[in-house]
Amino acid sequence: MIATPAAALPTTLTVTGWDDPLVEAHGFGPRHPYIEGVYGGVIGPSALVCYRRLGALVELGLDDIDIDVVDLAVSLGLGEGTGRNAMITRTLHRMAAFEVARWLPDGRYAVRRALAPLPEYRARRLSLSARRFHEAQTGR
């Protein structure tokens, strides 16, 4: 079960790394072109940019970083709201829905250090250009 904030986000988000050695060995880090070329069409633009920002921190091994949620939202162009229906709230929940990140029971937000190549059932739904990029990067 995924633990998520009940309503509005806290003012400070503690970001930590989501360790997955298999994915990290065979996947793509947040700054790899595969993330934008393939995952962008799956998770959406705000989740993509947020993953690039937070994923780069945890990829470098910076765990348990306190992030001001309003500052993060504004820096991503998502406004200042942090309520239940705010863009930053929906973005963080979308990342969790696609297992790019997850809420830990203690309230921290764990972000993957790398993302696995898309499974075939998702890759079939990509645009033609994204599908070709996926195939070129993965060999399948």
Image (cartoon, grey):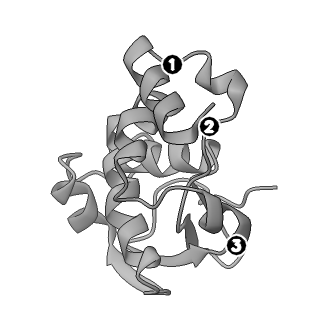
Label 1 or label 2, whichever comes before in sequence order: 2
Mark identifier at residue 126:
1
Q: Amino acid at mark 2?
A: Leu
**Residue under the image location 62 percent in, 50 percent down:** 116
How far apart are labels 3 and 1 at the CA level?
Answer: 26 Å
Q: Position of residue 91 (x, y in %)?
A: 42, 45
**Location of residue 52 in the rendering, given as x and y in whole percent from the top left corner:** 35, 57
What amino acid type should be assigned to the residue bearing mark 1? Leu
Residue at the location (53% across, 79% down)? Answer: 16
* Outermost residue, right side: 1
Is 105 positioned to the left or the right of 80 in the image? right
Apparent side of residue 41 relative to residue 23 in the rendered image (left or right): left
For the C terminus, the image quarter is top right
Q: Is residue 47 visible?
A: no
Callout 2: helix, strand or loop? loop
Tell me residue 58's x, y (percent): 45, 77
Mark 3 vs mark 2: which is more N-terminal?
A: 3
Query: Residue 70: horizontal and vertical position, in percent?
Result: 26, 63
Disc 1 from disc 2: Cα separation: 10 Å
Q: Which mark is residue 118?
A: 2
Query: Circle 1: is it few (<14), some (14-19), or many (20+) Cα within 10 Å?
Result: some
Rendered residue at 33%/42% (across/down): 46
**Residue denoted by label 3:** 21
Which quadrant: the N terminus? Answer: bottom right
Figure check: 43 above or below 96 = above
